[in-house]
Image (cartoon, rainbow, N blue to C red):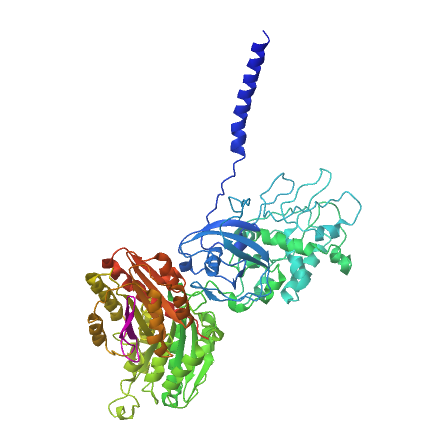
Amino acid sequence: MITTPFTTVCVALLLTCGALAKPNGQKNKKPKQVVPAIECDVRAGKINLQEFIAKCPANCKETTQPVYGTGVFASMSSVCNAAIHSGVITNSGGKVIVRKTAGQASYKGSFSNGIRSLSLPKWRESFVVEVGKPKKGAVYPSTLDYTASKPTSVKTGSKAASAASPATTAPEPITTAAPEPTSAAATTTPPTTPTTTAPPATATTVKPRAAVHKVRDAGSSHPYFASMAAAAAGSRQSPSGQGKTQAFRSTSAAASRFAPRPNTGARRTDVGSAIRRPGAPSGPALNRVQPARPERNQHASPPPRATEPDNSRKAVPDTTHARAESVDAWKPEVNPFDSGFVVQEQDSLPRALEPISQGDPNCKVDIAFLMDGSWSIGKRRFKIQKDFLTEVSQIINVGVAGPMMGIIQYGDDAVTEFSLKAYASSRDLKPAIDKIIQKGGLSNVGKALSFVNKHYFSDANGNRGGAPNVAVVLVDGWPTDRVEEASRLARESGINIFFVTIEGPDDDEKQNVVEANFVEKAVCRTNGFFSLPVSSWFGLRKAVQPLVKRVCDTDRLVCSKTCLNANDIAFVIDGSSSVGTGNFRTVLQFVANITREFEISDTDTRVGAVQYTYEQRLEFAFGQHNTKAELLNAIKRINYWSGGTSTGAAITYAAEQLFSKSKPNKRKIMIVITDGRSYDDVRAPALAVQRKGVIAYSIGIAWAAQDELEYIATDPDKDHSFFVDEFDSLYKFVPKITHSICQEFNSQPRN
């Protein structure tokens, strides 16, 4: 009789435990990390988290969002572009972990992974990026908390208000119940978040704008801020009090700028307009430092501010720092250099950094104008030339996000009037051009081009590396020295040369021309694209629009003669038995198609070829065939060998037989084509040849080993290694390889 109930109880307990075990088991499972997505323009400083994970979209490199620093970046940098610059992700996007650190005294710019980062003297906060794989046990927020772009709404006496930032702390309420001198406390207490109301018997006063005013007042000697302080002090000493207390209300930037102000205290009128300077931030940035309204506590007759001792502001040493954080938490969204006057170290930022968002991004080129200062031009025509350059500078929309412009004047010798980095806006260029004084002398264009090639396009002068270099030569009549050799060397250094010739020599003067057809010898031979003849100085203005359109056509610049004439290209061709006769002819057609894209001569691009199996054979050397037709015939005559596959030995052979005889001013390019795994090691030979400055491309077909293709190719692999399933698809890579060679050529920074 006892056994049955006991059994029933045991079964019930087992069922209960089983039911409870399942939810507990589910509860103990490791939660899946949710990775929030961000846009390319999101900056680390706009996210209120010390460490977080995020997912970047593809193609951020094309957005040209600014990055400051190398390895450690200023917090106003784009998170995604900083990650690409560091090599954490590629341009196809991916996950990244961001960890914020302290601000740095300086940030050094560099060019890495196709992104040019800029230098910065200092910034208040930094961050580093890591691969987006959280360590075991680490869980990051699934949503990101962004800095508010509008002021936080604050109402005295309300229970709740919108928070400004998770990093801020609630201020202590200011009470008037005790007979202590609360006036000083009211002045020094920083309101960083909406103030919590005190018990009913006390009154709470919030003074964010007074805090802003005092932070600036404490460290600045600018007459504007001094006058503001005086005005504010005078209003605080006013015995009238104007009757009722005026509660503080934080509004949006637009509302605070245009809302009527009935009080008669310190106002922005006249004073603000008196100190505004050209280029200074306007709108919300100035709105943050406008003088505070006269503030009054809700108790009777506070002591006048004028009687406070000088050290009253030093009673709480940490309040200035807290106050700076509070203002920064609710400031409106503006450009990164409009971060307010709260952090005083920002005052030392160079003015050149302000127009970071200026300039036409569709015309990102570095342009040097070579203006003719010879005596033959005369003062009147020299003035016309300056007017022409001024108009070009205004139309082209100069700025660090677009074109940068410098000017060289040449006569007997060349002189830099100003470098690429001297002026960061079209507005600043106009007075600079007006001040140029004619140099005089002969029209030595060849010397000027040599000067540009050797000295002008350097990092010290503002060359950005990722922007094509352009030299526009203005010449009156004809040069008095030779230009062909200087032009060729400049083009081989990656400089796109344009000639604007005004009033060329007439029939009687042609006998005095030092070098006939000098324009055709100086520029790329592309149907007149790089030459612009003008019949009269008075018609020079008509050339402004056509010239601007041409120098901004970056597609034509990327694959102009500047990259097509400066290479020694070695084809290393697999002739193993697995290829077969028919496929080998397809490979030779692929080699011929690439060759057709380049300008072939002993002074332009030279091509050599090696075929390999177990052994190697030099088909022809650099410079052996100096015309395109002759070279294409030589490629066609290569006989299929058949045998094994020793790719490593073939790379070493190409280095010895071809690249050891390469010219110093040529870029060395190796294109390896193979259809299978090598019988020998490819890593050591590939590394050795790359250390000698050879840029290696690998083309794999059918059974080629992916790991070997990556070992052979120069980093990054995605730009230098290609694979197809069948030989007939090789033709697809002709434009990709040609464009990659040209794009890489123009992105190389030169010192």
Q: Residue 221 appears at what percent x and percent y?
A: 66, 66
Q: Is residue 395 visible?
A: no
Residue drawn at (80%, 46%), measured in percent from left and top?
179
Q: Which residue lies furthest to the top in this view?
A: 1
In front of the other: 529 or 99: 99
Which residues make up the magenta segment? 598-622
Apparent side of residue 78 relative to residue 722 in the rendered image (left or right): right
| Quadrant in which residue 502 is drawn | bottom left
**Is 61 left, or right, of 48 in this rendering?**
left
**Relative to 729, 291 lies left or right:** right
The foreground one among 96 and 228 is 96
Which of the image's four quarters has the N terminus?
Answer: top right
Which of the 4 image quadrants contains residue 748? bottom left
In percent of width and height, residue 256 lies at 56, 52
Front one among 289 and 695? 695
Is 380 above or below relative to 286? below
Is 604 covered by the magenta stretch?
yes
Q: In this view, does 533 lie above or below 355?
A: below
Question: At 53% from the left edge and 33% from the top edge, which residue is drawn?
Answer: 27
**Residue 300's x, y, as percent?**
75, 46
Number of disc labels: 0
Q: Where is residue 547 in the image (x, y as percent from the top left)?
A: 33, 73
Quadrant in which residue 595 is drawn: bottom left
Q: Can residue 242 be seen in this view?
A: yes
Residue 454 in the magenta stretch? The answer is no
